[in-house]
Image: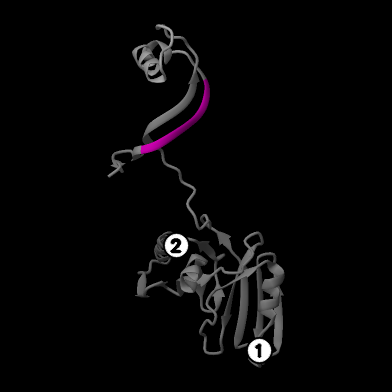
């Protein structure tokens, strides 16, 4: 159950890097299919511009020239969706990203994360409206950077799309009826009921107050452009 809940909070980040530089604003997607399609587009556009072929060394990575297009799945659990979303990335001394993409809520949180590198003192901090970067180590061989991200598709976990259903119902109404029937004096209850039955068509036209109603769903069909799905009783 915990793994399923965590998956519901996952998002996909598309990043274009060159060396340890994030070249363009990171893009955040809920759908991995959409994110992969956009990553493929980034790689195709860069390859065309550079007159270079696009290489796909493994899933989630496209390479062309000096550019790497990265598709990373990361957790959005606990990240305030009402704040700006930043993506943090740390380059270790050997040039490996760890973490490759970390979601951060707001610029203050992004700055605090960039400035922290356990066991190492920060050398320089560079900040703009959209980026924050810091270097660490005697040779500036470690770098932490955070970029303001672009939210590129809807992040709701539930679809808001609605469809129409055609329904067939059996309805029962309970109403009062006032009227008169003619017969000899001194009739029993059962004989009066017989007179009501004989005159029911006329009496039933004189309905007064609705006391109760009930319904039962007999059949329903989800309406599609080209097909209908029927779900009748039994």
Residue in the foreground of this view, choosing between 165 and 118: 165
Location of residue 93 by image quarter = bottom right
Whether residue 124 is in magenta: the answer is no
Kindly report the secondary structure that dominates the magenta region of the rendered protein: strand
Residue at image coords 56%, 75% = 21
Question: Is residue 178 shown above or below 86?
Answer: above
Where residue 150 appears, as percent x and y from the top left, is 57, 60
Q: Which residue is mark 1?
A: 118
Is 152 situated left or right of 44 in this image?
right
Quadrant for the C terminus in the image: top left
Is 211 situated left or right of 82 in this image?
left
Question: Is residue 98 shown above or below 201?
Answer: below
The boundaries of the magenta stretch are: 209-217
Where residue 84 appears, as percent x and y from the top left, is 65, 62
Judged from the image, the secondary structure of the residue bearing numbered disc 2 is helix
Residue at image coords 41%, 65% = 43
Residue in the foreground of this view, choosing between 54 and 117: 117
Judged from the image, the secondary structure of the residue bearing numbered disc 1 is loop
Is 160 situated left or right of 193 in this image?
right
Residue in the foreground of this view, choosing between 177 and 132: 177
Q: Which residue is mark 2?
A: 35
Where residue 28 appears, as percent x and y from the top left, is 53, 63
Q: CA distance from mark 2 to mark 1?
A: 32 Å
Check disc 1: other Cα within 10 Å, few if <14, some if 14-19, many if 20+.
few
Where residue 80 appears, as percent x and y from the top left, is 64, 64
């Amino acid at each position: 159950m915990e793994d399923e809940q965590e998956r519901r909070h996952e998002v996909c980040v598309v990043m274009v890097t060159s060396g340890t530089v994030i070249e363009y604003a990171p893009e955040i997607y809920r759908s991995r299919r959409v994110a992969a399609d956009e990553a493929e587009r980034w790689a195709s556009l860069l390859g065309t511009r550079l007159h270079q072929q696009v290489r796909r060394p493994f899933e989630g990575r496209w390479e062309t020239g000096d550019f790497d297009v990265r598709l990373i799945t990361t957790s959005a659990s606990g990240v305030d969706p009402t704040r700006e979303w930043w993506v943090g990335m740390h380059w270790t001394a050997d040039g490996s990203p760890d973490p490759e993409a970390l979601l951060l809520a707001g610029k203050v949180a992004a700055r605090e994360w960039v400035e922290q590198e356990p066991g190492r003192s920060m050398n320089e901090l560079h900040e703009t409206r959209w980026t924050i970067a810091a270097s660490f180590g005697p040779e500036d061989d470690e770098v932490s950077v955070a970029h303001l991200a672009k939210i590129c598709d809807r992040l709701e976990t539930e679809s808001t799309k609605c469809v129409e259903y055609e329904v067939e119902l059996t309805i029962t109404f309970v109403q009062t009826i006032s009227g008169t029937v003619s017969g000899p004096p001194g009739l029993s209850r059962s004989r009066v009921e017989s007179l009501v039955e004989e005159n029911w068509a006329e009496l039933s036209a004189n309905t007064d107050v609705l006391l109760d109603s009930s319904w039962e769903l007999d059949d329903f069909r989800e309406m599609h452009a080209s097909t209908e799905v029927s779900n009748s009783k039994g």
